[in-house]
Image (tube, rainbow, N blue to C red):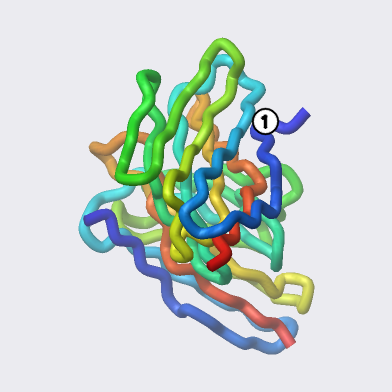
Amino acid sequence: GAVVSQHPSWVICKSGTSVKIECRSLDFQATTMFWYRQFPKQSLMLMATSNEGSKATYEQGVEKDKFLINHASLTLSTLTVTSAHPEDSSFYICSAREVSGGYEQYFGPGTRLTVT
Amino acid sequence: RKEVEQDPGPFNVPEGATVAFNCTYSNSASQSFFWYRQDCRKEPKLLMSVYSSGNEDGSFTAQLNRASQYISLLIRDSKLSDSATYLCVVHTTGNQFYFGTGTSLTVIP
């Protein structure tokens, strides 16, 4: 149980284009989903917290107009990196908390984004 | 001061050894505590929650010390497959999650 999927698992895009990453909870409903970014050999950095049906809460320093988050249902959240630049290249990971669960987070397998 | 601090290591231990990691947290109102394991270029996976009374899962033992504000993870009889980065995660009131930077463990044959 508690499986989270992400799509795509890796993507290469050109500078200036937008990329959408999907995060799905496959066997549970998630009121809250989290989006993280991780650079090589560094720790996870929380970008934003999204709650179903409401606007995402962004961490300090994360541009909400650049990283668009939509949490339209209890099983799906999307992160769109708009006008991507090479410095946006990173490992993006989502996680989800069960509606009826504790505070454990279950992570998706991550999306490796490379912007050329 | 960081919300959660971990010794990054690396810890290099021989197979079969016992190794312990600590993680300190600064918010005394922290409610829930977890240990996650992250393999290279993979997502973190929940290893175990940490309960006030301490808990054990196979060769892993987790403990919480609220007075001193730290959690610990003990790995007994370490195996090669235990090599990974171990992350502590603290959940506070206000629904905030804080991750440690991770402790790198390599078990050597």
- B61 relative to A21 in the view: left or right: left
The foreground one among A68 and A28 is: A28
Residue drawn 51% across the image and 49% down it = B17
* Image: B7 above or below A82: above
The answer to whether residue B5 shows anywhere in this view is: yes
* Image: B26 above or below A18: above
> Residue B40: where, in percent of width, then height?
57, 68
- B46 relative to B70 in the view: left or right: left
Residue drawn 42% across the image and 63% down it = A108
- A8 relative to A46 in the view: left or right: left
Residue B81 image-quadrant placement: bottom left
Residue drawn 65% across the image and 33% down it = B4
> Residue A26: where, in percent of width, then height?
25, 63
The answer to whether residue A79 shows anywhere in this view is: no
Residue drawn 67% across the image and 30% down it = B3
> Residue A65: where, in percent of width, then height?
67, 59
> Residue A21: where, in percent of width, then height?
49, 71
Q: How many marks?
A: 1
* Residue ID for mark 1: B3
* Image: B52 above or below A87: above
Chain hosting mark 1 = B
Task: Pick the quarter of the image with the N terminus of chain B.
Answer: top right
* Image: B19 above or below A114: above
The foreground one among B23 and A83 is: B23
